[in-house]
Image (spheres, rainbow, N blue to C red):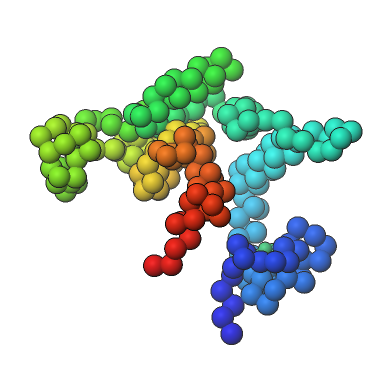
């Protein structure tokens, strides 16, 4: 029997209750006990434990228990600023897409108004031609004869590493470019904006519409 974990398809979801051992047969809470044990050992590192603890406190503080019921209260940008303050960070890096420079500027202002020292790096930093990584003239967005700088997430990460920022915030990096940034950045990184060119940077909208206007997303290939 295939015990591959499929939490995304679980119909029991008992892992947030005292009945946590009553999940399906492929429940990783039951089948992956050794991996869980090893992973939990990481939290014994004081810096990791403190990061995890503050993140959970931040999560807790994002709700209010009102007479009419529990309600959320913090937009993500507020959450990020509050978390950075909890962690005692002074210097914050922003790695942004050139197409979201307006948003990056607003974010920098919000953070500076709260006393953070902000370093921001645009994805086109270095102005390295796309041909350098094997992009053909037909694959250039502005057309075959144009000069087009490559998105340069490794350089973004390395400059922020060089500036010794304590925390990074991603603003709209492309799919894959964001992955490279995560791989090379030394400081922990969070995402403020996940780029979605169609849905105004709300990628979940495509999932919400997959039962109607975006049914094509569920096609079998
Ligand atoms: S951990 Fe177990 S109970 Fe929780 S969602 Fe995954 S399979 Fe379901």
On screen, residue 186 versus residue 204, left or right, reads left
Which quarter of the picture shows residue 70? top right
Rendered residue at 65%/53% (across/down): 44
Image coords of residue 138 (percent x, y): 15, 45
State left or right for residue 202 relative to residue 164: right
- Most extreme residue toward the right is 67
Seen as rendered, the residue at the extreme front is: 213
Residue pushed farthest left? 145
Image point 62% across, 27% down: which residue? 78
Determine whether 96 is above or below 186 in the image: above
Q: Does the image show residue 204? A: yes
Is 18 on the left-hand or right-hand side of 96? right
Residue 83 percent location from the top left of the image: 63, 32
Q: Quadrant of residue 216?
A: bottom left
Measuring 39% from the left and 24% from the top, which residue is drawn there? 101
Is residue 98 or residue 51 the one in the foreground? 98
């Amino acid at each position: 029997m295939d015990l591959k974990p499929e939490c995304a398809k679980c119909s029991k979801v008992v892992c947030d209750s005292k009945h946590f051992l009553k999940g399906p047969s492929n429940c990783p809470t039951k089948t992956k006990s050794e991996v869980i044990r090893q992973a939990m050992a990481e939290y014994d590192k004081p810096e990791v434990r403190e990061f995890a603890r503050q993140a959970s406190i931040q999560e807790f503080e994002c709700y209010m228990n009102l007479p009419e019921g529990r309600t959320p209260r913090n937009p993500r940008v507020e959450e990020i600023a509050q978390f950075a303050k909890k962690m005692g960070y002074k210097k914050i890096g922003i790695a942004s897409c050139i197409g979201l420079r307006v948003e990056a500027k607003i974010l920098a202002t919000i953070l500076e108004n709260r006393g953070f020292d902000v370093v921001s790096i645009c994805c086109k930093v270095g102005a390295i031609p796309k041909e350098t990584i094997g992009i053909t003239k037909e694959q250039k967005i502005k057309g075959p004869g144009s000069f087009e700088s490559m998105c340069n997430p490794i350089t973004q990460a390395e400059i922020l590493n060089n500036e010794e920022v304590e925390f990074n915030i991603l603003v709209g990096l492309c799919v894959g470019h964001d992955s490279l940034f995560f791989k090379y950045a030394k400081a922990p990184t969070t995402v403020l904006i996940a780029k979605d060119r169609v849905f105004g940077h709300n990628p979940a909208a495509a999932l919400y519409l997959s039962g109607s206007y975006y049914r094509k997303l569920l096609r079998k290939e």
